[in-house]
Amino acid sequence: MSEILTPSPSVGDRLRQLPQAGRGVVRSADIDTRLLGLVAALVIIWVGFNIASGGTFLTARNLWNLSVQSASIGIMATGMVLVIVSRNIDLSVGAMLGFVGYTMAMAQTVWLPQALGLGLGHPLIWILSVAIGLVLGLGIGALQGFVIAYGFIPSFIVTLGGLLAWRGLIFQYAQGQTIAPLDTTFRLLGGGPQGSLGEVGSWIVGIIGVVAVLIGLVLLRRRQARYGFQVRPIWATVAIGVVATVAILGAVWVANSYPWPEQLAIQYAEANGIEIPPGGLVIPTGIAYPVLIMIGVAILMTHLAERRRFGRNVYAIGGNPQAAELSGINTKRTIMLVFAIMGLLAGVSAIVQTARLNAAVTGLGVTNELDVISAAVIGGSSFAGGIGTIPGAVLGAVVMQSLRSGMVLLRVDSPTQDIVVGIVLVAAVGFDAWLRRRST
Amino acid sequence: MTALPQDPAPTTPPVSKAGYLVEMRDVSVSFGGVHAVNGVSINLRPGEVLGLVGGNGAGKSTLMKVLSGAQPPDSGQILIGGEPAAIHNPRDARTYGIECIYQTLALADNLHAPANVFLGRELVRRSGVLDDSAMEDATRKLMGRLNPRFRNFRGAVQSLSGGQRQSVAIARAIHFNATILIMDEPTAALGPAETAQVRDLIRQLKDEGLGIFLISHDIHDVFDLSDRISVMYHGEIVGTVNRDDVTTDQVLAMIILGKKPEEVTAEELEALHASG
């Protein structure tokens, strides 16, 4: 009888304890589990598509393209995180992007060359165009933020109005025209073989990244130890350092494994008088500029969100607006700044998208708001406010783009793609909510 | 709770010639046509606990929100240390050394304890980067005295117990050398042990020379802790009495009937006893 009442642990029980043990390791290593789950989902998606496509998904070429395609949405998603964390929404990012993109295209093809008398291709043209785009994006975002914060009009309404108004303005002054081609230097910001860092540059960036991560890990340990706080076990710090190093250098290696298209390489060789070696000229592409911009934006935004008073206040407002107000936080100014930053990032993405297209079309950025919001939400941002991370949103953008890109490889038609992405979005949020209910 | 939970030695707060830390004069607040607070005057000395009691909607919380900057008054004057004070928002109130522990605690549930203690007053390094380690360190020291069993310094305060959350709210109020403390129902959500802890803390802060406004429904709390008791009724002060001069019955009569002890008739008192 006693054996029946107190059975020895079965295999099933032991298996059930395994995830528990895994969770213990993650907890003592002080790692964000949500982010880890997202990485796991990404690995599953990548491996799944690779198998289904017969090995064409995990190629340097496809991954490089994936990185460039994710950049524009990823950049804006970092700003959308702060918007959503502060219990707001911005539906106008696509329209802002279109408006800013169109204005920049006009500036560099018509206004600047004519008004300032600069010849086409003058270096000032692309610099001024970029500046105009950034300032315009910032200004539009700040204007919307001002109306939201000081006019007490819900952000959903203000940015819905913005979506219609900015899109309408594009049609009004574009008259359906496509503006192309753009400034040759400006175009490089959109990526492509020449709009990339190349082999040496990519390695340098990768090594700087590795060194920065390692220094950061050491400094964190030292600071925590100085105050006598609980410090990550040394194995965890070492493991994180090794994983980060491998990931960064691996990404650089992949980007460098994608060579320039043969025709382009030959043209380049002829133009620069390089002799083509037997077996063809292989020029590694390296990290594309838009990807570099996205990484830079993500680092800056993470710093702003987690290491600055402004970010802390945004999270406090999202967690409890009354408490934030009562504790003396200038909530109105903070909300306005959040939207200003969102506008600025729409400007950055406008640069990337117009440069990549080498044109401004009236449909620029249409439905981008949905992709950006989806990326932030898949990345763990919660509409209840106060929750969301920048790295999560960037990963969310990569997950979305991976799904689309994978389905294109599998020749899935566009409507079916939308259906799948829609279902994944809802399922991801449902899963996240379920996990959160269980953990509390 | 052995040592005083304030960081530097308490400075002597400024007082008026009459010895008052705070004087609120003829303060009125109305919402629409309703006079939530109607011509109320009230004052507080250092080292004094003033119990503020009254039924629901009597105007206690609204009056205190005026002092803490959360509710601008329609009219009236606030003097701090005998000088007129301009309090338009919570930030202004803080510069006058006024801290408030709200009934709702006003915590950002998604942030950890140190972030809540320093909410709106975050410590930064010279580079402008948040000094989370210093904030955690200060919070640990504060909690070591306030609530030694408090351990969770890195989890969201959402996951803390009611008493622990209360500790965080109190830590926030007293860390910045407040001279005037407003406590709105500080024990309403607490168990017996935690209530006792908060009472000890109030006595201790009082001994340090802080002036404390204590809003409470619990007449026993008020009688145990207060030096004087002000009773509010329909937005007005019925009267302010010395704790030692009155009985709980008399104060209850003031709360329920809105009349001073000497104005209450024997019949009314009897009816009160019959119903209670």
Image (cartoon, coloured by chain):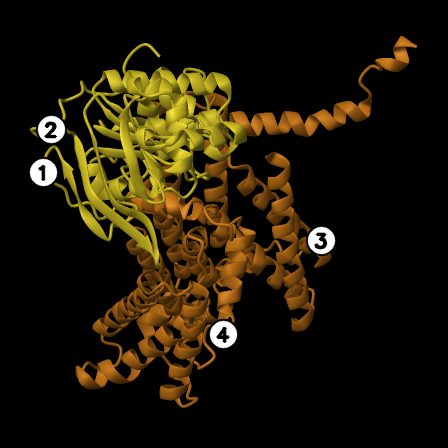
Chain colours: A orange, B yellow
The amino acid marked with disc number 4 is Val
Using the image, name the chain to which the residue with label 3 belongs: A
Q: Residue furthest right?
A: A1
- CA gap between label 4 and label 2 equals 62 Å
Q: Which of pointers 4 and 3 lies earlier in the amino acid sequence? A: 3
Q: Is residue A190 above or below residue A382?
A: below
A386 vs A212, left or right, is right
Dot 3 falls on a residue whose secondary structure is helix
Residue in view at x 46 percent, y 43 percent: A249
Dot 1 falls on a residue whose secondary structure is strand
- Image mark for residue B14: 2
Given this view, does label 4 or label 2 mark the residue nearer the observer?
Answer: 2
Discs 4, 2: same chain: no
The amino acid marked with disc number 1 is Glu
Quadrant housing residue A121: bottom left
- CA gap between label 3 and label 1 equals 78 Å
* Residue underneath mark 4: A366
Dot 4 falls on a residue whose secondary structure is loop
Residue B80, x across and y down, in percent: 14, 35
Using the image, name the chain to which the residue with label 4 belongs: A
The amino acid marked with disc number 3 is Ile
Residue in the foreground of this view, choosing between B227 and A326: B227
- CA gap between label 2 and label 1 equals 9 Å
- Asked whether residue A46 is in view, the answer is no
Given this view, does label 3 or label 1 mark the residue nearer the observer?
Answer: 1
Image quarter hosting the C terminus of chain A = top right
Residue B260, x across and y down, in percent: 32, 32
Q: Is residue A429 above or below residue A404?
A: above
* Residue underneath mark 3: A51
Residue in view at x 36 percent, y 68 percent: A351
Quadrant housing residue A87: bottom left
